[in-house]
Amino acid sequence: MNYWLILIPVISAFIGWVTNWVAIKMLFHPRNPVNVLGIRIQGIFPKRQEQFAEKLGKLVSRELLSFSDIEEKISNPENLKKVLPMVETHIDHFLRVKLSESMPMISMFIGDKTIEKLKVTFMDELEILFPKVMKDYTNTLKQQLDLEHIVTEKVKAFSGDKLEEILYQVMAKEFRFVEIIGGVLGFLIGILQVLLTLLTQ
């Protein structure tokens, strides 16, 4: 038996591992275009960052953080009810303290019963008014705040080093698995080559 045949699976495993390692590195490198033998090479993320930013901007503005969802949440009566106790406390303080400070003559003729009636009236009106106000505010905000443009510009300006660092933090195990799989497949292909060589001799 030729002992050099044993090296074939080892070499194939190394080549498989290196190939996958290089493929992962080429997701991020080189940052800027480089000409190698007349072929222009650039990392996938740096090369596609602008397109990625535009797609992500559309996704965030239309699917992940749409103004219709925001409007629905902030104008939802159940959510507004959670805010009303704080508003009621503020109105009570205004009628009992601030009104007497700013208009002492009027406060002299307003007793607890009147204050309670005024407070109930104000709160009833606010329950009707709040959803309309919040809906109008959301529409105004939508016209003034272009979410798609903001996200797109932020991602375009995102540092390649920072993006690589984040992805490695999130996907370090997956990247390592891809490298190992490359080595395992290379090793199996090497064994197959050895077997075919032995069978043909």
Image: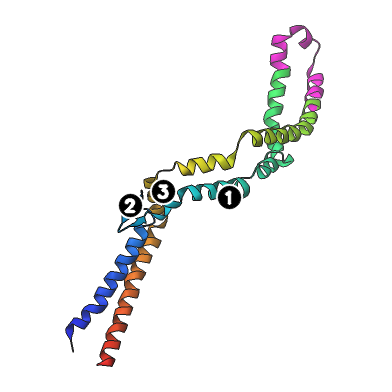
Give the answer, above or below, for where 13 lies relative to 78.
below
- Quadrant hosting residue 27: bottom left
- Whichever of labels 1 and 3 marks the residue nearer the N terminus, that label is 1
Q: Is residue 55 magenta?
A: no
Residue 156 spot, x, y in % from top left: 47, 43
Going 34% across and 70% down the picture, which residue do you hit?
182
Q: Is residue 106 magenta?
A: yes
Categorize mark 3 by other alpha carbons within 10 Å: few (<14), some (14-19), many (20+). some
Secondary structure under badge 3? helix
Categorize mark 2 by other alpha carbons within 10 Å: few (<14), some (14-19), many (20+). some
Q: Distance between the Cα atoms at labels 1 and 2?
A: 31 Å
Categorize mark 1 by other alpha carbons within 10 Å: few (<14), some (14-19), many (20+). some
Indicate the quadrant containing the N terminus: top left, top right, bottom left or bottom right.
bottom left
Asked if the residues shown at circle 2 and circle 3 are in contact, with their CB atoms under 8 angstroms apart, the answer is: no
Give the answer, above or below, for where 64 lies relative to 110.
below
Residue 59: numbered disc: 1
Residue 151 spot, x, y in % from top left: 53, 42
Q: Distance between the Cα atoms at labels 2 and 3?
A: 20 Å
What residue is pinned by disc 3? Answer: 163
Secondary structure under badge 2? strand
Going 24% across and 74% down the picture, which residue do you hit?
11
The range drawn in magenta is: 96-120
Callout in the foreground (1, 2): 2
Residue 127 spot, x, y in % from top left: 77, 33
- Whichever of labels 2 and 3 marks the residue nearer the N terminus, that label is 2
Q: Amino acid at mark 3?
A: Leu
Q: Distance between the Cα atoms at labels 1 and 3?
A: 19 Å
Going 76% across and 34% down the picture, which residue do you hit?
132
